[in-house]
Image (cartoon, helix red, strand yellow):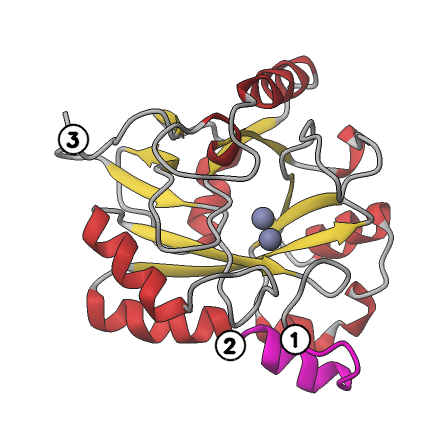
Amino acid sequence: MNNKYIYETHLHTSEGSACGRACASDIVRAYKNAGYTGIIITDHFFYGNTAADRKLPWNEWVESFCKGYENAYEEGKKAGLQVFFGWESGYNGTEFLVYGLDKKWLLEHPEIRDADIPEQYALVHEAGGMVIHAHPFREAGYIPEIRLFPEYVDGVETINASHSGTLAKSRCMGHPEFNDYATLYATDHHLAQTAGSDQHSTEMVYGGMVFNRRLADIHDYIRAVLDREAVELLDGTRNPFVE
Ligand SMILES: [Zn+2]
Ligand SMILES: [Zn+2]
């Protein structure tokens, strides 16, 4: 375990996601106790399963949406866990993890709410962010069809530990082939790859990405992903902190 820095890249809080089953501060403590170096909060965005009231004016919606991250950040400062911000956008079941922007950017860019997939990519890129296709080959009731957009993403979440993991209970588990297809897809299109747990509780799924160094911030994470710096993508079939 020495000299390994493990980051969770796909995680939902009950403050930000309607399906979140644990609050941000409990999640931070669980990840700290498990041994993670950092986590990225990726709550469901406006047209996903957001917990923030869609009837609110944009400014208030953003404030409400960011609560999960903000609470996690405060708790992380106390606990000694890095906490970065992202979100998971939803397009009728097709989902993307967006990294590298912040609350200030959201407040200044209400057009992100109704952006289509090419517009999302353009807006996020213009601001220096990164778009990752989340679990592109997941089959589930809320996903009417598998749709691929290789020209509008920087990378693919090839390992979603809630598909392949055996250490935690997950609705999507028992389908490591969803990850295998995603890996073939990313490889074929020379797209960067990420791994995350799709965490919705405090029960460790043991997904995430292993780096040889501590990441400075979310922009450093983006660089590390695009530079293919991860030394391992964790699939949740083993506890990476025990070896
Ligand atoms: Zn969810
Ligand atoms: Zn998710």
Q: What percent of the width, then of the height, locates residue 148? A: 79, 29
Label count reads: 3
For mark 2, what is the residue? 67
The quarter of the picture where the C terminus appears is top left
Task: Name the residue at 42% across, 64% down.
Answer: 22
How far apart in space, not on screen, are marks 2 and 1 (Cα)? 9 Å
Q: Which corner quadrant of the image does residue 123 belong to?
A: bottom right
The quarter of the picture where the N terminus appears is top left
Q: What percent of the width, then of the height, locates residue 237? A: 36, 25
Task: Look at the image and say whether residue 63 sits in the magenta stretch.
Answer: yes
For mark 3, what is the residue? 242
Mark 2 or 1, nearer chain start: 1
For mark 1, what is the residue? 52
SS at mark 3 in the image: loop
Binning the other alpha carbons within 10 Å of mark 1 as few (below 14), some (14 to 19) or many (20 upward) gives many
Mark 3 or 2, nearer chain start: 2
State the extent of the magenta-drawn residues as a range: 53-66
Task: Name the residue at 21% across, 46% down.
Answer: 35
For the residue marked with disc 1, what is the amino acid? Ala
Q: Are the two marked residues, 2 and 1, in contact with CB atoms closer than 8 angstroms? A: yes
Mark whose residue sits in front, 2 or 1: 1
How far apart in space, not on screen, are marks 3 and 1 (Cα)? 38 Å
110 or 78, which lies in front?
A: 78
Q: Are the two marked residues, 3 and 1, in contact with CB atoms closer than 8 angstroms? A: no
Q: Is residue 34 left or right of residue 88?
A: left
In the rendered image, the vertical position of residue 5 relative to residue 165, given as above or below:
below
For the residue marked with disc 2, what is the amino acid? Lys
For the residue marked with disc 3, what is the amino acid? Val
